[in-house]
Image: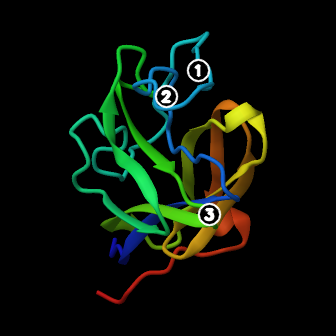
Amino acid sequence: MDLKTLPLLLLWTLIASLPLLSALALPSTALDLIDSPPPTHQHTQPLSKRCDNKLANPSFESGESPWLAMVTSSWTTRAVYTSAQGGHQGSNFYYGHSNSTIDSTLTISQSAINIEAGASVECAAWIASSRPGNVGSTRVEVFLDGESCGMQYLGTTGWTRVGGRLGDEAGMRVGGLGG
């Protein structure tokens, strides 16, 4: 069987509203960088693996590599942190804090991800957001190869899954190159 693949680019984009804090994957022990952190997610049943994760270092357990961070506007903090309570899974999480008075964007991405042509893939991220006084919202959108997998506005919500399915089942096709 000839598999056609396309290097895919995964983008997690975080756009902050005026002039409030923004956080990507922020657990409750984020080094006391904010006043009211969201609660950590508590699993009531063991997780079962349904498929292979095509991302390298998806939970930041090996630091920031191979993720590439890109920003617009002003961010006082952007980095991978380790916490005893951890992120959604594992002990690490990516944290971003914007002090901008205008919209700001934080994008973290990976490239050279190969997915079989015509495959239907789950494209999602677990995000926690915290806002001063729980006022306003943070817009979070997840992309795969330039296609939006889903978007939500988050207040102080704890861990929220943002994203969805791309591929034949959704009427869209993850393209392939001849080869």
Q: In the image, what residue occupies the spot 61% across and 19% down?
A: 39
Place residue 103 in its image quadrant: bottom right
Local packing at callout 2 (Cα closer than 10 Å; few below 14, some 14-19, many 20+) is: many
Q: Secondary structure at mark 1?
A: loop
Q: Are marks 1 and 3 in contact (CB under 8 Å)?
A: no
Q: Which residue bears the numbered disc 1?
A: 41
CA distance for labels 2 and 1: 6 Å
**135 or 177, which lies in front?**
135
| Residue at the spot of label 2 | 88
Badge 1: how crowded within 10 Å, few (<14), some, or many (20+)? some
Task: Give residue 126's position: percent from left, percent from top.
Answer: 55, 39
Q: Amino acid at mark 3?
A: Leu
Nearer to us in this view, 28 or 34:
34
Indicate the secondary structure of the residue bearing disc 3. strand
In this rendered view, identify the residue nearer to me: 88 or 128. Answer: 128
Is residue 94 in view? yes
In the rendered image, residue 122, in percent from the top left (x then y), is placed at 56, 52
User: Looking at the image, is 142 positioned above or below residue 58?
Assistant: below
Q: Is residue 119 above or below residue 158?
A: below
Indicate which disc, 1 or 3, sits on the residue closer to the N terminus: 1
For image coordinates 64% across by 56% down, the residue present is 165
| Nearer-N-terminus badge (3/2) | 2
Q: Type of residue at label 1?
A: His
x%, y% of residue 29? 45, 20
The disc label shown at residue 166, or none: 3
Q: Which dot marks residue 138?
A: none
For the image, the number of numbered tags is: 3
Question: Where is residue 6, by image quadrant?
Answer: bottom left
Q: Are marks 3 and 2 in contact (CB under 8 Å)?
A: no
